[in-house]
Amino acid sequence: MILGGASRKGTTMADDKRTATLTIDGQQYELPIHSPTAGPDVIDIRGLYGRADVFTYDPSYTSTAACDSTITFIDGDKGELLHRGYPIDQLASKSHYLEVCYLLLYGELPTAAQLDDFEHRVTHHTMLHEQMQYFFRGFRRDAHPMAIMVGVVGAMAAFYHDSTDIHDSWQREVASIRLIAKMPTIAAWAYKYSVGQPFVYPRNDLTYAENFLHMCFAVPAEEYKVNPILARAMDRIFTLHADHEQNASTSTVRLASSSGANPFACIAAGIACLWGPAHGGANQACLEMLREIGTPDRIPEFLARAKDKDDPFRLMGFGHRVYKNFDPRAKVMKESADEVLDLLGVEDKPVLKVAKELEAAALADDYFVDRKLFPNVDFYSGIILEAMGFPTSMFTPLFAVSRTVGWVSQWKEQLADPQLRIGRPRQLYLGETSRDYVDIENR
């Protein structure tokens, strides 16, 4: 099998006339090559099976583009993350979460009037259907908040029938706003339920991040005032996790959507995928590692273990599978972490002392610097959430709140794609060939 072809940048998918030649058993097949606006060229193999009766093999789809998208672009070598072309560090430092939500959903930064209307719509849809309280109470008291979120979000289709028709553009819009608006309430109530405290209703006089913190930490017995530094840090966490291209949970949402499933079922599927420790649990794993280290004097021991190829220990929160240079979100998150730690202090939290000293030690160690194993966004977000008082069981639900707008944006984009067909990955079958059934008495 031989694959060859010239390479040329700068053409669009519609105008590109280049092809790659694939030779199988002496037979040649011409495959179109498409050039994106950014990123590597793509060989179009859609017609290959019909023409050559062969599949391609790509476990985990790490070399396969399953869709075309205009939402988010990642250049791992450069350490670049763009939402609709805007660098994430600019959005995180100059914008705020709901403005970024608008950008992801509609493709452009909003005018002042558009942003005001969007914020009003989101703010006034944060309430949950009152009967959904009983749904929460059906879970065991010690249920994991992510288990509750998967169930409650999926159940929204039973409470909001007027926004489940994916073929109605207005219903798609209503479902989008409802999911973004209600997800913080669902996450906060899952947390309240898990700690045995009464639910706190959302307030329309608070910002998105303020409202979430208020619903998580307020109690009826006394007034709770949201500290603006904590609210800003929370908003940045939401912003920095809003979307991340075609990751596992986003691909899950797209695959579920391709079947025609309702929006709430699709997002519930994304939450279920995010729950996996290899995906949404990285900041929790980082905090667990810091607790394993225990005290700052043990940091050299664990750094040495991280360098030992024969030791299974890995330094969590450093480096990134996609970013081969640095995580562009980490710089902004570090600023928030420093602000939060200065505000709250770390004297009574040994894990945060370990985190600060581990960060300094790793950044001064040539082994990690040469390999570009810098602290990533999960390292700093875990520190912030720990300092705020969130248990590690809430880290992934917070991630789900942040990522909802990304899932919804990708869901809407896919439904508008004229090429949409139900997803159907193929396989390399290595099992038994056809066999005749053997009666049980003869086995």
Image: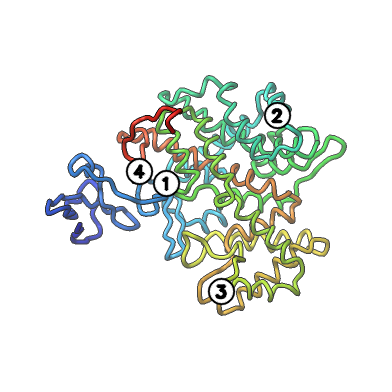
Label 2: element kind: helix
Q: Which mark is residue 368?
A: 3
Badge 2: residue crowd in 10 Å (few <14, some 14–19, many ≥20): some
> In the image, 361: left or right of 58?
right
Q: Do the residues labelled 2 and 1 touch (CB within 8 Å)?
A: no
- The residue beneath circle 4 is 427
Q: Do the residues labelled 3 and 4 touch (CB within 8 Å)?
A: no
The answer for how far apart the CA atoms under marks 3 and 2 are is 45 Å
* C-alpha distance separating marks 4 and 1: 29 Å
State the image coordinates of residue 425 (x, y, percent, origin top left): 36, 41
Closer to the camera: disc 2 or disc 1? 2
Question: Disc 4 marks which amino acid?
Answer: Gln
Q: What residue type is labelled 1?
A: Ile
Crowding near pointer 3: few (<14 within 10 Å), some, many (20+)? some
Sequence-wise, which precedes: disc 4 or disc 1? 1
Per the image, label 3 sits on a secondary structure element best described as: helix
Residue on which the image places disc 2 = 136
| Circle 4 SS class | loop
Residue denoted by label 1: 71
- The residue depicted at 64 percent of the width and 43 percent of the height is 397
Q: Nearer the viewer, mark 2 or mark 4?
A: 4
Looking at the image, is mark 3 or mark 2 earlier in the sequence? 2
Label 3 vs 4, first from the N-terminus? 3
